[in-house]
Amino acid sequence: MSGRPILVIEDNEQNLYLVRFLLEKNGYEVVEARDGQTGLELAKRLVPAAIILDIQLPVMTGYAVATALREHDALARVPIIAVTSFAMVGDRERCLEAGATDYLEKPIDPSAFLAKLREHLGA
């Protein structure tokens, strides 16, 4: 592991609990933000190993956060995995166009979630 934390930007308590549990159980350090603006500020300060990003967030949408993250050189290569209940035609593409590296639908499948994260971390 990189020694850098995984940043989880999620406002739903249950989803946050599940993601935190899965990550910590698998040895990752987790830093969390409950709104888009706080998540963006933490990402710029910490330069995390990866970012798990909900799309429906208060203050700033996940789309706006992903776009803003990609404007910072230090964050340009940080994997952003959009995790969202948006599962209509075009939602995946919209997430990727905003700057997400990958996309997972909610509810989260724990094994698929961890496999996707490991793939992007090169682990």
Image (cartoon, grey):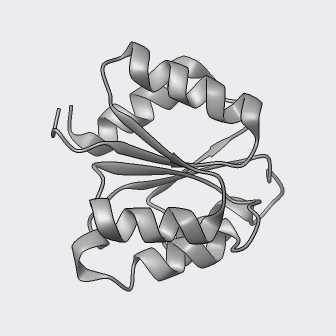
Nearest the eye: 62 or 38: 38
Nearest the eye: 90 or 12: 12
Q: Residue pushed farthest right?
A: 88
Q: Vertically, is 119 above or below 11?
A: above
Q: Vertically, is 115 above or below 61?
A: above
Q: Residue pushed farthest left?
A: 2
Quarter residue 1 falls in: top left
Q: Where is residue 123 in the image (x, y as percent from the top left)?
A: 21, 31
- Look at 51% across and 30% down and name the residue there: 113
- Look at 38% across and 86% down and name the residue there: 71
Asked whether, in this view, residue 1 is left or right of residue 88, the answer is: left
Q: Vertically, is 114 above or below 90?
A: above
Q: Where is residue 78 in the image (x, y as percent from the top left)?
A: 30, 60
- Look at 70% across and 33% down and name the residue there: 15
Q: Where is residue 52 in the image (x, y as percent from the top left)?
A: 51, 48
Please say whether residue 3 is visible from this viewpoint. Answer: yes
Nearest the eye: 30 or 82: 30
Please say whether residue 97 is visible from this viewpoint. Answer: no
- Look at 32% across and 82% down and name the residue there: 72
